[in-house]
């Protein structure tokens, strides 16, 4: 029955959500479902939401409403049924927005509201719905098999969930729950499985991986174990390798042993280290667990291993009682650290957090102005960072190979997590014009590229040539 059905996905928020969406899509694809674009008419829509800001709430609601509208006409026929009915189009809403807005959301026979803890059961729920059956969720938050590359070239492995830090602005500990670590044996097995299946880049993901612990294994030990797996050959010359990337980390509790991981040739020299503010006073008010000085030293240590190590971050602007001086410290940090990318968001109170009750809420107008100033400074810093890669060699993991003007153009990300485009020499273009054969398969292979120029815009692409 599954073979004729189609499922569309939309997700918001963190890398963990992306991984979970991709894993669910993989499982449904393996059951015979077609995975299609969210805008296309589908038999089922899965919306994996986020609640980290008011904006994320709004987007979550919008996606949910879009999915419901898309299924409305077909649902009308089943309007009287209160039970799941085989064949009726289905909307599944899950993710952190569900956990924080449970009271206002209601499941019925055509809409399933699935809490984070039960997200892993969505493939079985969808399949059961179309068979006219009901399944009861079982399992745990790590019951997500390795995802195939459906939406991204990189393959993500979940190592941890939840958080115990309770930063004063953050709702995550309430919606994802307390910190839990997946067993190191399972993580290494999942990475090995992905490598054997041909993955060239594995991304380790979790909510707060710095606090990973499985018996005597901490996060550094876990990464060390993942780096020592034998590589697989894809049949392309030089293709016997994979690289490992860490998706996002809290910058506390990271010792020298952790820094030295980046001496390993398989480690991608990039980290998303959430700074949130350059002001020590704000870091304290946010209950962050590091000082700005510690963050600065961590950045310097990483750059002592690779001077072009890419550090990206989150900055929260307009936190309660943030004064001009505090904000100026955040702007100064953008230049001092030399971030390769800054994700900024204006503070919005989340119900049930300490910051919601703090005095000195910053007016919206000021938050908007400060966000705009951060974006301007961050765009300039990103450009400077990418310029620093001119003349270097990057190892591009090819995501797309397209014919343009008779030649092949390969695009993807380098090890420093920057977008790169490489135009292959003319003879390949001649081959492409002259031959009806499909071009050699480049996707998901590594290509050494000399970086020669930088494009325009707020996400400028590096251009290079093979070699
Ligand atoms: S470390 Fe702080 S910001 Fe990050 S998930 Fe935990 S509570 Fe939230």
Image: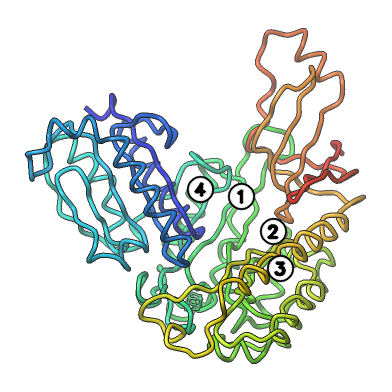
In space, the residues marked 1 and 4 are separated at their CA atoms by 9 Å
- Upstream in sequence: badge 1 or badge 2: 1
Q: Which residue is mark 1?
A: 201
Task: State yes or no: discs 2 and 3 in contact (Cβ < 8 Å).
Answer: no
In space, the residues marked 2 and 4 are separated at their CA atoms by 17 Å
Foreground pick, 458 / 466: 458
Q: Look at the numbered disc 4 and give the secondary structure of its residue.
A: helix
In the image, which is nearer the foreground, mark 1 or mark 4? 1
Q: Position of residue 444 (x, y in %)?
A: 63, 38
Q: Position of residue 144 (x, y in %)?
A: 37, 54
Task: State yes or no: discs 3 and 4 in contact (Cβ < 8 Å).
Answer: no
- Is 341 positioned to the left or the right of 85 in the image? right
Q: Residues within 10 Å of mark 4 (few under 14, many from 20)?
A: many
In the image, which is nearer the foreground, mark 2 or mark 4? 2
Q: Is mark 3 within 8 Å of ligand 1?
A: no
- Quarter in which the C terminus is drawn: top right
- Is 57 positioned to the left or the right of 330 in the image? left
Q: Residue at x 29, y 28 (%)?
A: 5
Q: Which residue is mark 2?
A: 268
Q: Which residue is mark 3?
A: 374
Q: Which residue is mark 4?
A: 194
In the image, which is nearer the foreground, mark 3 or mark 4? 3
């Amino acid at each position: 029955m599954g073979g004729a059905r189609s499922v569309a996905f939309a997700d918001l928020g963190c890398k963990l959500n992306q991984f979970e969406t991709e894993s669910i899509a993989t499982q449904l694809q393996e059951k015979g479902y077609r995975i299609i674009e969210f805008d296309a008419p589908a038999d089922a829509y899965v919306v994996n939401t986020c609640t980290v800001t008011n904006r994320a709430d709004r987007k979550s609601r919008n996606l949910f409403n879009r999915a419901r509208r898309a299924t409305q006409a077909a649902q009308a026929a089943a309007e009287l049924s209160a039970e799941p009915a085989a064949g009726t189009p289905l909307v599944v809403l899950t993710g952190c927005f569900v956990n924080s807005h449970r009271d206002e959301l209601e499941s019925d026979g055509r809409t399933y509201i699935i809490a984070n803890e039960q997200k892993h059961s969505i493939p079985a729920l969808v399949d059961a719905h179309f068979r006219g059956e009901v399944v009861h969720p079982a399992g745990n938050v790590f019951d997500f098999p390795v995802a195939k590359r459906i939406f991204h070239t990189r393959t993500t492995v979940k190592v941890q969930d939840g958080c115990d830090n309770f930063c004063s602005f953050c709702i995550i500990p309430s919606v994802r729950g307390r910190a839990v670590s997946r067993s190191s044996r399972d993580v290494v097995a999942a990475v090995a499985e992905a490598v054997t299946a041909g993955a060239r880049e594995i991304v380790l993901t979790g909510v707060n991986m710095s606090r990973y612990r499985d018996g005597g294994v901490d996060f550094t030990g876990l990464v060390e174990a993942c780096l020592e797996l034998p590589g697989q050959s894809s049949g392309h010359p030089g293709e016997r390798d994979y690289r490992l990337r860490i998706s996002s980390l809290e910058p506390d509790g990271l010792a020298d042993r952790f820094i030295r991981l980046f001496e390993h040739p398989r480690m991608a020299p990039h980290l998303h280290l959430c700074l949130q503010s350059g002001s020590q006073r704000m870091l304290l008010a946010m209950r962050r667990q590091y000082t700005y000085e510690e963050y600065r030293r961590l950045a310097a240590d990483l750059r002592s291993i690779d001077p072009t190590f890419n550090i990206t971050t989150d900055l929260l602007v307009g936190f309660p009682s943030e004064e001009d001086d505090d904000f100026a410290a955040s702007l100064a940090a953008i230049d001092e650290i030399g971030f390769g990318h800054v994700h900024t968001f204006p503070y919005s109170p989340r119900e049930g957090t300490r910051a919601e009750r703090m005095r000195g809420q910053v007016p919206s107008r000021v938050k908007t102005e400060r966000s705009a100033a951060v974006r301007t400074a961050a765009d300039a810093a990103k450009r400077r960072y990418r310029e620093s890669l001119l003349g270097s060699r990057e190892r591009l993991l090819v995501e797309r190979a397209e014919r343009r003007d008779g030649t092949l153009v390969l695009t993807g990300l380098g090890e420093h997590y920057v977008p790169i485009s490489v135009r292959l020499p003319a003879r390949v273009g001649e081959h492409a014009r002259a031959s009806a054969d499909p071009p050699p398969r480049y996707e998901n292979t590594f290509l050494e590229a000399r970086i020669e120029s930088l494009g325009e815009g707020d996400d400028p692409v590096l251009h290079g040539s093979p070699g």
